[in-house]
Amino acid sequence: MLLVGIIGVVLVGFLISGPQLWVKRQMRQHSADRPDLPGTGAELAEHLIKHFGVTGVTVEQTDAGDHYDSEAKAVRLTQQNYEGRSLTAVAVAAHEVGHAMQDHNGEAGLKRRHRMVKFAMATDKIASIFFLAAPVLGLLARTPAAFIGFAAIGIALLAVRILVHLVTLPVEYDASFGKALPILKEGGYLADSDLPAARSVLKAAALTYVSAAVMSLIDLARWIRILR
């Protein structure tokens, strides 16, 4: 039984950290500066925004991770990708510009994701209230059914986060393989020999949310197990 428990812990740890470690490895593997590349990640992002007529979008440096802010209309890159002249910087910049293009084109997937993200932030807060209140209300009602009922509502609210991740993945894949990779390939921004590495980085960029989705599933399973 002890061996089974240890194996279970290891498997859970791999499920939680595996995707995140793989993403970091792909980004790091291709992050060396390449003097032969014509520009930095920020310069490419600015060029692509202008080239494709994506109006009103700026390119900024951030400490909060590479992302596109649809409310501020800003492509935000970490210092390494903003100033770097590497395959990772180029691919990540193209990926985030892909999101800006989705926004500019009014694509339904991105709009749906933003609505659900805002909704999920609200439901997460409400869920925490339900979990805190469930034991107290259960005692006041003097019945386990009250506790189970409130906890079940909290679990249902947490499940919204998983739905957000399900919506996010297709949007991320489109930014990488529907937008960024064709741009880099057909626009001649990278040599053919560099495209496999760029494809790996773009896949990592698209899968950034996978570890978060797994964490959400594990949290949900943990609460369901408690109720059982």
Image: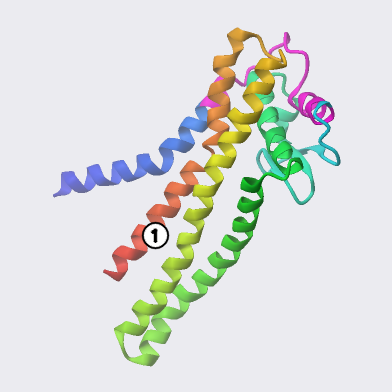
Residue 80, visible in the rendered structure: no
How crowded pointer 1 is (Cα within 10 Å; few <14, some 14-19, many 20+) is rated as some
Q: Quadrant of the C terminus?
A: bottom left
- Which residue is painted at 60% across and 12% down in the image? 194
Q: Nearer the viewer, residue 165 or 66?
A: 165
**Residue displayed at 61% across by 46% down:** 109
Which residue in the structure is indicated by mark 1?
220
Task: Tell me, yes or no, whether the highlighted magenta stretch contains residue 49.
Answer: yes
In this rendering, does residue 215 appear at all? yes
Residue 18 picture location, percent across and down: 41, 36
59 to 132, vertically: above or below: above
**Could you say which quadrant of the image residue 43 lies in?**
top right
**As displayed, is residue 187 above or below residue 179?**
above
Left/right placement of residue 36 relative to residue 13 reads right
Coloring scheme of the render?
A: rainbow
Query: What amino acid type is highlighted by mark number 1?
Result: Leu
As drawn, is 5 to the left or to the right of 71?
Answer: left
Q: Which residues are magenta?
A: 26-50
Please tell me in which quadrant of the rendered image residue 205 appears.
top right
Of all residues, the one furthest to the left in this rendering is 1
Left-right relation of 30 to 100: left
